[in-house]
């Protein structure tokens, strides 16, 4: 009898209070995963940048810095990719109608670049319908 080729994945989860200091726990998890799975430096840098942006956005914009609300971060490590999911308890936002940060009138704005950066650095970026959950894929 032929044995099925079963590929397993490993799941990591963080529940972070909605305060900026929670980023330290996120960075620790990213570093742990990068070390354990020998993630290339450029992929590690992209993951660190994207996840920092996504979690800060979830804390500040999604949960409005309400420390009673959580940001849930999941990392599913598969043989060829890592899928990160960031979910906040906020109402979400319309990710299809964001101002273009590269437009001349927006170049000097101090905010508004996070989603743009995430979309350019992750291999795939998927928002849920409400806009309060983001799935990021990185090839490894």
Image (tube, rainbow, N blue to C red):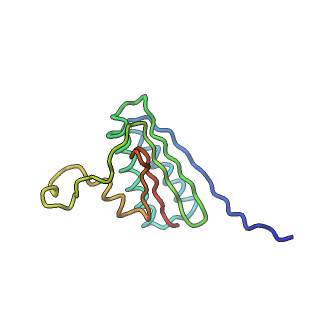
Q: Residue furthest bottom?
A: 2
Total numbered labels: 0
Residue 89 percent across, percent down from the top left:
43, 36
Left or right of 11 in this view: 50: left
Q: Residue furthest front?
A: 129
- Compared to residue 135, the image places residue 120 above or below, namely below
Of 26 and 8, nearer the camera is 8
Left or right of 53 in this view: 9: right
Left or right of 138 in this view: 76: right
Q: What residue is at 45 percent from the left and 47 percent from the top? A: 86
Of 53 and 28, nearer the camera is 53
Q: Quadrant of the N terminus?
A: bottom right
The image quarter in which residue 126 lies: bottom left
- Compared to residue 137, the image places residue 134 above or below, namely above
- Compared to residue 137, the image places residue 73 above or below, namely above
Residue 57 percent across, percent down from the top left:
34, 45
Residue 78 percent across, percent down from the top left:
59, 61
Of 22 and 115, nearer the camera is 115
Left or right of 17 in this view: 112: left
- Compared to residue 95, the image places residue 140 above or below, namely below
Residue 12 percent across, percent down from the top left:
57, 48
Q: What residue is at 32 percent from the left and 59 percent from the top? A: 117
């Amino acid at each position: 009898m032929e044995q099925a080729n079963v590929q397993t994945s490993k799941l990591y989860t963080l529940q972070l209070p909605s305060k900026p200091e929670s980023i330290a726990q996120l960075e620790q998890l990213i570093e742990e995963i990068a070390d354990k799975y020998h993630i290339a430096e450029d992929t590690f840098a992209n993951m660190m940048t994207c996840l920092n942006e996504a979690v800060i956005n979830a804390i500040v914009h999604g949960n409005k810095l309400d420390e009673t609300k959580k940001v849930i971060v999941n990392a599913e490590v598969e043989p060829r990719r890592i899928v990160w999911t960031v979910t906040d308890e906020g109402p979400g936002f319309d990710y299809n109608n964001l101002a273009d940060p590269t437009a001349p009138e927006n170049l000097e704005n101090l905010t508004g670049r996070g989603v743009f950066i995430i979309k350019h650095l992750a291999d795939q970026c998927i928002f849920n319908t409400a806009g309060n959950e983001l799935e990021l894929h990185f090839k490894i």
